Image: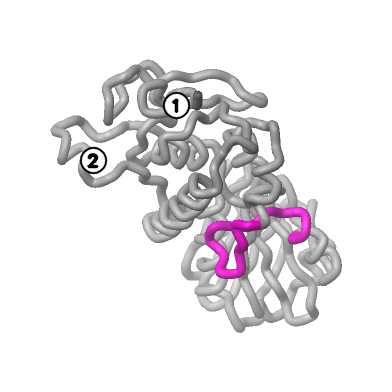
Amino acid sequence: MPEGHTIHRLAAEHQGMFGGLAVAASSPQGRFAEGARQLDGRVLVSADAHGKHLLLGFEDERTLHVHLGIYGKYMFGEGPAPAPVGLVRLRLEGGGGFADLRGPNACELLEPGEVKLLRDRLGPDPLREDADPEVAWRRISRARTPIAVLLMDQSVVAGPGNIYRAEVLFRQGIDPRLPGRRLAARQWRAVWDDLVGLMAAGVRAGRIDTVRPEHMPEAMGRPPRVDGHGGEVYVYRRAGQPCLVCGTAVATAELASRNLFWCPGCQPPAV
């Protein structure tokens, strides 16, 4: 599932291509035909993201809400849109380009009150200027739940997924199994600040890189990482490989039905 930086990039792409323009909307697949009819000819007035949720605001105060889920994908193109290929849930056209949405978990029109309900159930997003990390800390500091699980809970922190949670906990030397209430306030602030920086870099680069300069391939004389997810990382999907910092084999386990990765040397259990 795409992590939050990808959704913020999608918001920017929509704004750049369609912002302030009346768009032509259609649903070649047919599953969003009524919603597309209501959007057709409307002006896109805002393109926003909150966590993994894309929110496109139109002039009639309705908002298109898209959650890609596991299988959802966007394709943008310039020039006249070609004949649809595959199951295109929604096509927007305007400004000399088009955007095709396929396979989303959610594609729906929301009224202003429904948008508020959606936002209210999400935690602070490290990529948003209005984010308040104290809101997340109030929940984390009371929780018996492991911090690795809390960081994946979108009602606690909106946006991070499995890669960012594994990497930020490694970078801060925190055992992912540590209960939230045993995390120190200074540790939480360091995690939050690191997420802000890492995810902002992800927006700029279009991929997740979490390795510090001294651990990059050229600095260490090692081959670049080859993985479908791209980017240089410390522990994510590196189970059994030596830690780039201490050489300990990266560990893996299942936690709350998701694969967890950490370095037992750099992230020892708290005493």
Q: Quadrant of the N terminus?
A: top right
Please, what is the three-letter code of the amino acid marked with disc 1? Trp
For the magenta stretch, what is the residue range?
A: 119-134
Secondary structure, mark 1, is strand
Number of other residues with Cα within 10 Å of mark 1, as a class: few under 14, some 14 to 19, many 20 or more: many
Say whether residue 139 is left or right of residue 95: right
Q: Which residue is mark 1?
A: 262
| Closer-to-camera residue (224/118) | 118
In the figure, is residue 14 to the left or right of 198?
A: right
Q: Position of residue 212 (x, y in %)?
A: 28, 45
Task: Examine the structure image and report whether residue 152 is included in the region drawn in magenta.
Answer: no
Residue depicted at 70% across the width and 46% down the height: 139
Amino acid type at circle 2 is Met
Q: Residue furthest front?
A: 271
Residue lying at 36% horizontally and 33% vertically, measured from the top left: 234
Give the alpha-carbon distance from disc 1 to disc 2, as whole Å: 18 Å
